[in-house]
Amino acid sequence: SAEHFTNDLVSHISMHNTKSFHDKYRTCDVLLVDDVQFISRGDQVQEEFFHTFNALTSNGSQIVLTSDRPPKEMMTLEERLRTRFEMGLIADIQPPTLETRMAIVKKKAQDHELELSDDVIKFVADNIKRNIRQIEGIITRIKAYQDVENVKPNLAIAKRAISDIINDQQPLPVTVENIINEVARTFNVSAGDIRSEKRNANISQARQIAIY
């Protein structure tokens, strides 16, 4: 992690042993750094990472960086580092598809020696769309229910396990349909009125707000 890189640098500087730090990071075949956006927080860290980056690319080593934003949006990142980050392949990693999430649920269950039916696997995958760590937490809960209550995991157990993360109080997804319906309800007009060409004052206002 970028935090580990930073802490390691600080530790070596405090021990007056930067050579050991250079030997560790500038001679590897592959350097994988997670959350590299945090490196942008310190000038000395950026300076060290700049020279590490140059040394590795000069040696033909591979560098793989992950972050929660593209280099151009790292506003505190030095320009010389930003351009180097942009010289490689930039891949936007999207949330996994349903099929991939189902495969992850199945694999996590196997790791916990847990046998889940297809409907339980699909239920978990349907409800956890972005945070894969949450899937592991749910599988751990299902396993606990099985061990404590001595019951075979089913859909009811899965719903209990997921209730701490997913609940009925979640806001509605922001879609055009939901916006139109909510505006229509608030202004006491119909969704059809908003979509129509009617120019009554209250309908026009509702239509303008829905568009906004």
Image (cartoon, rainbow, N blue to C red):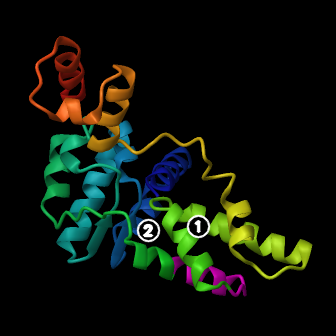
Q: Contact (CB < 8 A) between labels 2 and 1?
A: no
In magenta segment, residue 91: no
Instruction: Give the overall secondary structure of the magenta segment.
Output: helix
Q: Amino acid at mark 2?
A: Lys
Q: Which range is magenta?
A: 104-115
Q: Which residue is mark 1?
A: 135
Residue at position x 85%, y 79% in the image = 151
Ranked by sequence position, the earlier of labels 2 and 1 is 2
Q: Which residue is mark 2?
A: 24
Residue 119 located left or right of residue 189: right
| Residue 42 image offset from top left, x and y in percent | 37, 37
| Residue 80 image offset from top left, x and y in percent | 15, 46
Q: Nearer the viewer, residue 116 or 114?
A: 116
Name above or below for residue 189 compared with residue 150.
Answer: above
Q: Quadrant of residue 63?
A: bottom left
- Secondary structure state at the residue bearing disc 1: helix
Residue at position x 31%, y 45% in the image = 46
* Mark 2 → mark 1, Cα distance in angstroms: 35 Å
Q: Amino acid at mark 1?
A: Ile
Residue 39 located left or right of residue 180: right
Residue 144 located left or right of residue 179: right
Q: Which mark is residue 204?
A: none
| Residue 78 image offset from top left, x and y in percent | 21, 40
The quadrant of the picture occupied by the C terminus is top left
Name above or below for residue 88 compared with residue 59.
Answer: above
Residue found at the very far top of the displayed protein: 201
How dense is the environment of label 2, judged by Cα within 10 Å: few (below 14), some, or many (20 and up)? few
Q: Nearer the viewer, mark 2 or mark 1?
A: 1
In magenta segment, residue 109: yes
